[in-house]
Image (cartoon, grey):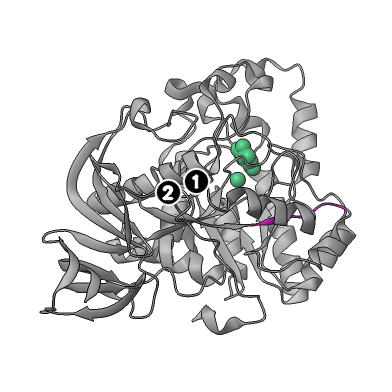
Amino acid sequence: MADLLLKKGKIVFMDGIREGDVVVNGGKIVEIAADYREEATRVIDCQDKFIFPGVIDAHVHMRVPGTEYKEDFATGSMAAVSGGVTSFLDMPNNVPPIISKKMLTEKRGLADGQSFANYGFFFGATDDNVDEIKRISNVPGIKVYMGQSTGNLIVRKDEVLEQIFSYGKFPVVAHAESQECLTRFAEEYAGSDARSRADFHSVVRPSECAREAVKHVLHLAKKYDARVHIAHASTAEEIDVIRKFKTDKVTCEVTPHHLVFDDTSYEKLGLKLKVNPPIRTRADVEALWAAITDGTVDIVASDHAPHLLSEKDAEYEACPAGIPGVETILPVMLDAVNKGLLNLDRVAQLLSAGPARIFGIKGKGRIEVGYDADLVIIDMDVEKKISNAQMLTKCAWTPWDGMTLKGWPVMTIIGGEVMYESGGGAGGASAGVGKFVSSRRAGELDFLQ
Ligand code: DOR
Ligand code: ZN
């Protein structure tokens, strides 16, 4: 007898939505049937609901090790699961940053047994750790900060960038803001009256700095025929450049906050919206949506970057950049579906199949026989007002506070286990159910289909 039967749901496949039953056994999808007649240990009625492939959030900062007071694997992964995120890929700008094989192993040890969701870890590049990059395995990518952000990870030397691209074993994930350009603008605005403007962060880290960096990495990727992933593209100018260079090896991510907020949003939210790259103009927001429609954008990732409200409530210089988002990424995209901005099967490509493809995660991101039973049940008719008080992230706030979104996950299943039910909290599950997610290497390109 099968462990679990999801009965009569609208199943979200990559090429469309069809009604049927999903049968789960031993943590895997074992059958997809129009009408499954056998018994199962647990049957969940999915009538009028959608069965969606578990979200793989390919860009989060869970703050372990070093700043666990902002987030840890248990709180961050519970927040993730409550929002339909079944796996996450965590960034290396920890304290200390994850820049050696030893630290990577230690970080994995800190996550093992702690997480509700599945997890993988990016590795950080510096000006002098190419040797370490060559020693590691099983990472989804190498994170390259081209400009300074939260933490002190950065690659300043061009010859090092060349070495990283020429190595080519892992995709290079670029935080593309040029440090030279950022420094130029910081100097220009030092002591300027503009510093008191609500949107100063967007003024002092302009579009130009992102465009310069994106151009630079895309030229390098082309030179070495390497795989590059542009993290959090935020401007129309970047999108134009990416569109020109786009191949199977050039991929692009956008965040929910860059798809929703614009530089007028600072009036209400102030420095809570301080984030790198900054919130941009409405024209930029529209360019990102157009790029989602035409396929230039491959994935949406949250860039969940929790900081406490007490830290965000500071003057400009002292306010840390970053906003939380792992538990709102799916509802924000579902609300966009309800508003007619895109289809639900496109959301599944952007949030689930896309990240699995780009980061070489086998057996996840789709509803197919043999795939892991990481699934989300969605009710597209549920409307909920978001509030800071509901948030499960340790930082306990969200820029979506007070907004009403339509379309919510009502149940999250990981490896065939019900991990979360709306109204019911964690469905009897305990931290530690989440497993390490391994990534295939860039050389093994069969997963690119
Ligand atoms: O705003 C940001 N916050 N951008 C980053 O690149 C890092 C992140 C963080 O870790 O807080
Ligand atoms: Zn980030």
Work out whether 102 lies above or below 65. below
Work out whether 371 lies above or below 306. below
Find disc 1 in the rendering and name its residue: 284
Q: What is the distance, in whole Å, between disc 1 and disc 2 at their CAs?
A: 5 Å
Q: Which residues are magenta?
A: 122-127
Whether the residues at callouts 1 and 2 have beta carbons within 8 Å, the answer is: yes
Question: Magenta-highlighted stretch: main secondary structure?
Answer: loop
Report whether 38 appears left or right of 439: left
Which quarter of the rendering shows the N terminus?
bottom left
Instruction: Decide whether residue 105 is among the magenta residues.
Output: no
Work out whether 193 lies above or below 437. above
User: x and y percent of residue 2 in the render?
Assistant: 24, 74
Circle 1 residues within 10 Å: few <14, some 14–19, many ≥20: many
At x 60% / y 16%, what residue is drawn? 314
Along the viewing direction, whichever of 253 and 58 lies nearer the viewer: 58
Work out whether 276 lies above or below 170. above
User: x and y percent of residue 63 in the render?
Assistant: 61, 39
User: x and y percent of residue 282 in the render?
Assistant: 45, 40
Q: Which numbered marker is on residue 124? A: none
Ligand 2 is located in which of the four quadrants? top right
Find disc 2 in the rendering and name its residue: 286
